[in-house]
Amino acid sequence: MYSLSEIAELLGRDRAALLGWVKRFDLPGFQGRGYPECYLSFLRSIAYLRLAQVTEKQIHELWTVELKLMALLHADSLGSPTWMIDGHDHPGHEERRLFLSRFDLGADVSAAAVQPGLDFSESEVELFGGQEMGEDALRLQASYRELVGPLRSKLSEQAPILTAAGRWAKGAEADNS
């Protein structure tokens, strides 16, 4: 468990910037050292994307689609306050995981199929089901792929530049020792 100040120090960001991300990505807040490991991992992903020149608007658009898709698949049904980023705590099956949330779809993300989750929550019965209201997991998954493709391309373009910058920084650090 971490405090937000500890996460900020680990990521080289100020606490105010992280509070902004917590608010904009609609994440639950915690007191003191109440922030779980998945918070550090998620916020690190956002920091890395920003370093790679991915706009916050692009990140938020993808996040919105991921949240809708996870809600349709009942990822929020077990009651964890951090359900939207709990996938960061479970490594493996990269081909099945959404990019930001790390939620495991149960099927390859690039496939035109999803593994519906079981809804364990006790919720009120809705007058219309999700599909009657125009919510369709496969449609959302297609939107997701349209958004994540250019983002991954941008990361591929930026990777050599960021790697070179990292090597340069290490060299500059060694020169100052």
Image: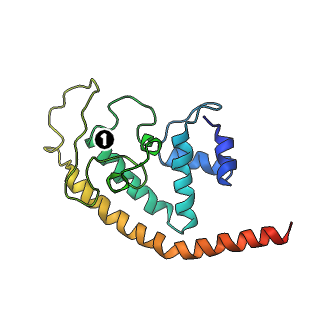
Residue with the most extreme right position: 177
Q: Tell me where residue 119 appears, x and y as whole percent.
A: 25, 31
The foreground one among 117 and 135 is: 117
Q: Quadrant of residue 72?
A: top left
> Residue 174: x, y in percent?
80, 69
- Rate crowding at label 1 as few (under 14), some (14 to 19) or many (20 or more) other CA atoms within 10 Å: some
Q: Nearer the viewer, residue 127 or 59?
A: 59
The residue at 15%/32% (across/down) is 127
Residue 118 higher or lower than 66, as above or below: above
Q: Where is residue 28 in the image (x, y as percent from the top left)?
A: 50, 36
| Quadrant of the image containing the N terminus | top right
| Image position of 83 (left or right of 73) | right
Image quarter hosting the C terminus: bottom right
The residue that appears at 72% across and 70% down in the rendered structure is 169
The residue drawn where x is 55% and y is 40% is: 37
**Total numbered labels:** 1
What element does badge 1 sit on? helix
Q: Say which of 139 and 87 sits in front.
A: 87
How far across and how far down the image is residue 23, in percent? 52, 44
Task: Name the residue beneath numbered marker 1.
Answer: 71
